[in-house]
Amino acid sequence: MSRFLAILSFYSLTRALYVTGFLFFSISGFSQVSTFNSNVVTGSWNVAGSWTAVGSDADGIPDADDEVIINSGHNISLNGNRAANLVTINSGGILTAVGGNITVTTSMTVNGGGTYIHAVNGGAIPLAAWDDTSNCIVTGYTTTTPMGVTQNFGNFTWNCTGQTGTFFPVINIKGNLSVQSTGA
């Protein structure tokens, strides 16, 4: 009988450890999602020092499961292809794509006075909820049309001094359209 109780106790303890371990790893798996707030006037997306993270993240750089907030007075440069779950550009905040694209899995919001600058030839302007007074500025077009130009923008500025190709976008603009340069 005592051997039976010892086996039963061992089985109960093992089961309790499995359940505890499962709960621990399940909860810690969810804690990997972080919120990243820009914390520099000028910084790079792929540098941990550009961000203040709330939550745990192994490298301190936003990735596909994270929320990103670009604060007023901050300009974050996107070098290379990056991803985030949620992106918010607040009033006075700027996200500048200079060497890659951002893939947003859930949603991107550009609040009034927030700015996205597309300094890339081709690529994709991310699909976003653009406030009526938000800004999308395209500066990198030369010959390859960027994807994502058929969404509803707030203010839209075209300033492509290196443009050599012809571009006839169908753009929906809720605010102001400004064409500053279409090449030489």
Image (cartoon, helix red, strand yellow):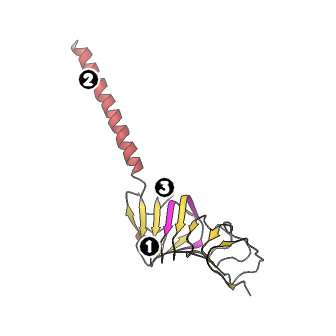
Q: Position of residue 129 (x, y in %)?
A: 57, 65
Task: Using the image as rendered, state which of residue 50 and residue 178 is in the foreground.
Answer: 178
Q: Say what amino acid the circle numbered 2 marks.
A: Ser
Q: Which mark is residue 65?
A: 3
Q: Say what amino acid the circle numbered 1 marks.
A: Asn
What is the residue that sits farthest to the left in this orientation?
A: 2
What is the residue that sits farthest to the top in this orientation?
A: 1
What is the residue that sits farthest to the bottom in this orientation?
A: 184
Q: How many marks?
A: 3
Instruction: Name the residue at 37% across, 45% down.
Output: 27
Q: Quadrant of the N terminus?
A: top left
- 88 inside magenta stretch: yes
Mark 2 or mark 3, earlier in chain: 2
Name the residue that disc number 1 marks.
Answer: 71
Mark 3 or mark 1, earlier in chain: 3
Q: Quadrant of the C terminus?
A: bottom right
Secondary structure at numbered mark 1: loop
Instruction: Name the residue at 29% across, 26% down.
Output: 12
Closer mark to the observer between disc 1 and disc 2: 1
Q: Say what amino acid the circle numbered 3 marks.
A: Asp
Q: Residues within 10 Å of mark 1 (few under 14, many from 20)?
A: many
Secondary structure at numbered mark 3: loop
Q: Position of residue 78 (x, y in %)?
A: 54, 70
Instruction: Name the residue at 62% across, 71% down.
Output: 153
Closer mark to the observer between disc 3 and disc 1: 1
- 87 inside magenta stretch: yes
Magenta span of residues: 85-105
Please determine whether, in this image, residue 21 is positioned above or below residue 170: above
Q: Which mark is residue 9?
A: 2
For the residues marked 1 and 2, what is the alpha-carbon distance in whole angstroms? 56 Å
